[in-house]
């Protein structure tokens, strides 16, 4: 039986990150539909499953690969935003972030040093700020 399934799946795209995401989204939407008994929600979860299985059984590997790459770029952009926000929150405890008035370069200065003269590493402009 496993050999028949393996032969059937040869030349087909299979499961990737977008497929896994779609499967989980369909399961979560189905779970939500248990509480809200709305036909639209049930049809939505079924449509996501149909598209997901279409992608898994597809023989057009280039198109499925491109779809997955677009999904990964979007995912990384969203997760990157939250990672940057987390880093900024952690740095705000120990550093001030100032922007150079001439070139708009961000400069990280330690807190608690008093009034200091800051030299921009990019354009070498000098400005005075309180840390």
Image (cartoon, rainbow, N blue to C red):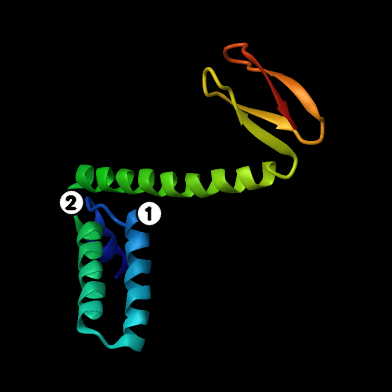
Q: Element type at marker 2?
A: loop
Q: Which residue is tagged 2?
A: 59
Q: Which image quadrant for residue 29? A: bottom left
Other residues around mark 1 within 10 Å, as few (<14) / some (14–19) / many (≥20): few
Q: Which image quadrant for residue 87? A: top right
Image quadrant in which the C terminus is located: top right
Number of callouts: 2
Q: Is residue 105 above or below residue 48?
A: above
User: Where residue 40 appears, x then y in whole percent?
Assistant: 20, 78
User: Where residue 118 appears, x then y in whole percent?
Assistant: 70, 20
Other residues around mark 2 within 10 Å, as few (<14) / some (14–19) / many (≥20): some
Say whether residue 74 is left or right of residue 79: left
Residue at image location 38% in from the left, 74% down from the top: 28
User: Are dots 2 and 1 in contact, CB under 8 Å?
Assistant: no
Q: Which residue is tagged 1?
A: 17
Residue at image location 20% in from the left, 83% down from the top: 39
Q: Element type at marker 1?
A: helix
Q: Is residue 29 visible?
A: yes
Q: CA distance from mark 2 to mark 1?
A: 17 Å
User: Where residue 104 appears, x then y in whole percent?
Assistant: 52, 24
Residue at image location 24% in from the left, 80% down from the top: 42
Q: Is residue 16 above or below residue 39?
A: above
Say whether residue 122 is left or right of residue 43: right
Sequence order check, earlier mark of 2 and 1 = 1
Q: Is residue 11 above or below residue 26?
A: above
Of marks 2 and 1, the one in the foreground: 1
């Amino acid at each position: 039986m496993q050999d028949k399934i393996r032969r059937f799946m040869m030349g087909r795209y299979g499961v990737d990150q977008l497929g896994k995401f779609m499967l989980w989204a369909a399961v979560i939407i189905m779970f939500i539909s248990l509480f809200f008994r709305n036909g639209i929600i049930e049809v939505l979860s079924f449509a996501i499953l149909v598209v997901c299985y279409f992608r898994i059984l597809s023989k057009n590997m280039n198109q499925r690969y491109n779809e997955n790459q677009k999904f990964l770029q979007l995912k990384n952009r969203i997760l990157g935003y939250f990672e940057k926000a987390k880093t900024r929150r952690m740095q705000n405890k120990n550093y001030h972030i100032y922007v150079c008035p001439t070139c708009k370069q961000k400069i990280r200065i330690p807190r608690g040093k008093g009034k200091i003269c800051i030299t921009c590493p990019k354009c070498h402009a000098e400005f005075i700020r309180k840390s």
